[in-house]
Image (cartoon, rainbow, N blue to C red):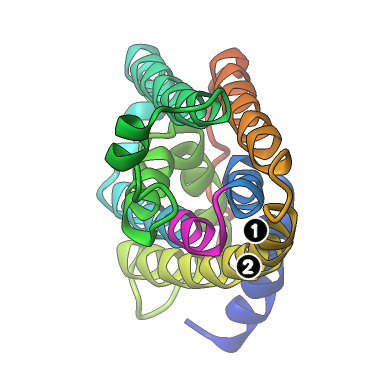
Amino acid sequence: MNSAQFLLFIPTALLLAIAPGPDNLGVLALGLSAGRRASFGFALGCAAGCLNHTLLAVLGVSALIAASPMAFKTLQWAGAAYLVWIGWQSLRQSLGRNAKEQSNTENDGHFLPHFKRGLIANAINPKVALFFLAFLPQFVQSGSWGLPQQLGVLGILFTLISALVFCMLAASAGGIGSWLKRSPRALPLLQGATGLLFMALALRLILTDGVAPPPARPA
């Protein structure tokens, strides 16, 4: 691999990470409604999910998913169902909870539960798997490194760039969310909006058809 690959890949990956999508929208929404720790957890979980898609691309599993409409639809519905579940949790909080429910969900704003949510939401999203299969090979070149090695390095680099962008979003959204939550009426509204956003993302995922990835750019 050479410097020209990285000079082309890094700004492209940075722009893609900044572009509005389910991951960064989720990070922003959680930062506003659940606080900075929850937002950081979800941000790093989503970024870590990219490692799963990198591995699938390296092993060729993403190509099998792209070639099988049933496999794609299965993952598509599983991902949508999980997003709906996350959204329902936020809506449930916005509608009010009794003392027992409050004690059972006192870790809502903690890092680890939201890291797991972000990791699972990203890892089972077939659109992200197809994106990696279509995007990473465009930057592969002939040389001493084989295709799997180059895909692995590019995928790890994309993960690091995504983590940086998502954490910056989490920091800014978390600060704004902490300020807004000083108002007793703000928190239920923010949690309700977050729940509706995740459900809208689930609907968007279901309504989007899978598209076969283009072939890799000739070396």
* Secondary structure of the residue carrying numbered label 2: helix
Q: Which residue is mark 2?
A: 165
Task: Give the percent coordinates (x, y) of residue 57.
Answer: 36, 49
Please report the bounds of the magenta region as a residue range. Answer: 34-43
Q: Give me the residue at 65% from left, 58% from top.
A: 17
Residue 155 among those drawn in magenta: no
* The image quarter in which residue 218 lies: bottom right
Q: Which residue is mark 1?
A: 17
Q: Give me the residue at 30% from left, 32% from top.
A: 100
- For badge 1, the amino acid type reads Ala
- For badge 2, the amino acid type reads Val
Task: Give the percent coordinates (x, y) of residue 113.
Answer: 33, 50
Task: Give the percent coordinates (x, y) of residue 209.
Answer: 58, 17
Which secondary structure dominates the residues rendered in magenta? helix
Disc with the residue nearer the chain's start (1 vs 2): 1
Quadrant for the C terminus in the image: bottom right
